Amino acid sequence: MTRTFRPDNKFPRSADTTQMKIEGLDVHIGASAILKNVNLVIPDKQITCVIGPSGCGKSTLLRSMNRLIDSTEGARIEGRILIGDEDIVHSGEHITELRRRIGLVSQKPSPLPMSIFENVAYGCQIHGIRNRRKLRLVVRHYLEAVGLWDEVAERLHTPASRLSIGQQQRLCLARSLAVEPQFILADEATSALDPIASRNVEELFVRLKNDYSIIMVTHTLRQARRIADHVVFMYLGEVVEAGPAVQVFDDPQHELTKKYLSGAFS
Amino acid sequence: MKFLEEKIVKALMYLSTALVAAWVVSILWTILSKGWGSMSWEMVSQLPGGGFYIGKEGGFLNAIVGSLYIVGASAVLGLLVSVPVVFYLNVYLRRSSKLGYAARLACDVLFGIPSIVYGAFGFALMVALGMRASLGGGIVVVTLLIIPIFIRSMDEAARGFPREILDTAYSLGATRLQTIGVVLRQIAPGIATATLLSIGRAIGDAAGVMFTAGYTDSIPTSLSQPAATLPLAVFFQLSSPIAEVQNRAYAAAAVLTLIVLVLSVGGRLIMNRFSKNKLQ
């Protein structure tokens, strides 16, 4: 596959590499601390897998990266999450533009209550692309990018909810890609899928890392071993260990990481 | 033993269903059997002529058109007011918001106020403003009457709205205002139900329009002229001692029922088209 973004893309996309840096991130929900002093660098155009037992703050970390945490009642967020020199935590109203640059694929496929076509076009429309012909090109391009075009070309205007779960998940990915993000956040994006659909989406991520930085929360260690370039191990709201996948998996530095990887707890 | 319970409960359920069905049929039967004789093309296509109210020529087109004017305009106005309210309550306010609680409570109180009180309120307001009974006054009062119905029934639909859909829209960079397209599509069936409930209440309401829209034998050509309505046409003709006029009241009631029926069925058909994308 060639580069996944269109040559005529409307959104400015900086050619230089952009890292995401997280500095001293604290998230509280009500009185409980969910994330404690998280410091991370998310490398550009690689797959970063976030692993750790349930309730360790993986999803909260992801939801902080695009500030969806705002819609959680009682959530407070402190620290900095930097993309280039822009701070997501303190971006105020500017967050809607930043969110465009950070795509999200959630655990359960979340098609919008619209047709297949409209699902992919929706993001472009809210960012001001109205030209019907251009939208058709965009929709086709990204449905092809996720390998869904051949399956749905004949029924673009039927409800998205009629697709199979695996197709819905790829549709959601196409929808995220259509607004030209730099980062893709995937929250256990394959855990609701059957093995074949899951493998499809996984392979898709591997191809997409040429163009996007992918941050993936996963419960499946085997999946992380298969696709991760970089691994972050979290426990009880703290980052225990982070580094290249080879190092974390083959030579974990921390006792907790060793135990987790060997299956002592999950 | 369990089997017996099951049978008894089942029998009771059948009985209740049959009762409701019988109720509907008997209402329709009463209206149609008494009104059918007086029903004619003249009744629904002509204004009252001289002596209409003592059983002579003419029809009640004035009331049909007046009712449709009032119901149509107040449904549109009601939607224009209620949709933003429901959107604000459910998208802008947090679930635990005190303002949201107060607003919903206020709506419940308004919901329970009898329409004669709305009529009296509208009448007092119009007197204070120096207005006479008019189509415009009727529209305003009926709109006030149905806004709480609109808000409460749409709100119920919107509260079941899956939050992930909002998160999805936000993650694509939508502002809260931009999510309205998504929200409206998802709650389209709720909006349809709310509209039908409101129209049903609005078209059948006599007390709200009695003082505010007044009654007239002609079709209003401006908002400041009085307007006749079907419920009042039924009311006035039924109060007559003449049997023929009383039967015309039933004919008017039949037309009223028919309009509600057509609107209900038509509304559902149209909204089914809009709601095909709704997620389960």
Image: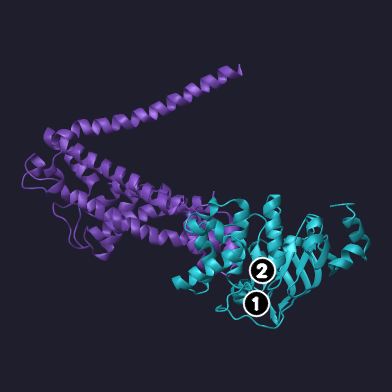
Chain colours: A cyan, B purple
Q: Name which quarter of the figure residue A49 lies in.
A: bottom right
Left or right for B280, reference A75: left
**Residue at 13% from the left image edge and 43% from the top image edge:** B41
Residue A221: image location, x then y, percent: 81, 57
Residue B81: image location, x then y, percent: 40, 61
Q: What residue is disc 1 on?
A: A91
Q: Nearer the viewer, residue B240 or B40?
A: B40
Q: How many marks?
A: 2
Residues packed near mark 1 inside 10 Å, few (<14), some (14 to 19) or many (20 plus): some
Disc number at residue A116? none
Marks 1 and 2, how far apart at CA? 10 Å
Above or below, A74 relative to B45: below
Left or right for B257, reference A34: left
Residues packed near mark 2 inside 10 Å, few (<14), some (14 to 19) or many (20 plus): many
Q: Nearer the viewer, residue B103 or B91?
A: B91
Residue A134: image location, x then y, percent: 48, 73
Above or below, A15 relative to B217: below
Return the chain for callout 2: A
**Residue at 39% from the left image edge and 55% from the top image edge:** B147
Q: Are marks 1 and 2 in contact (CB under 8 Å)?
A: yes
Q: What residue is disc 2 on?
A: A67
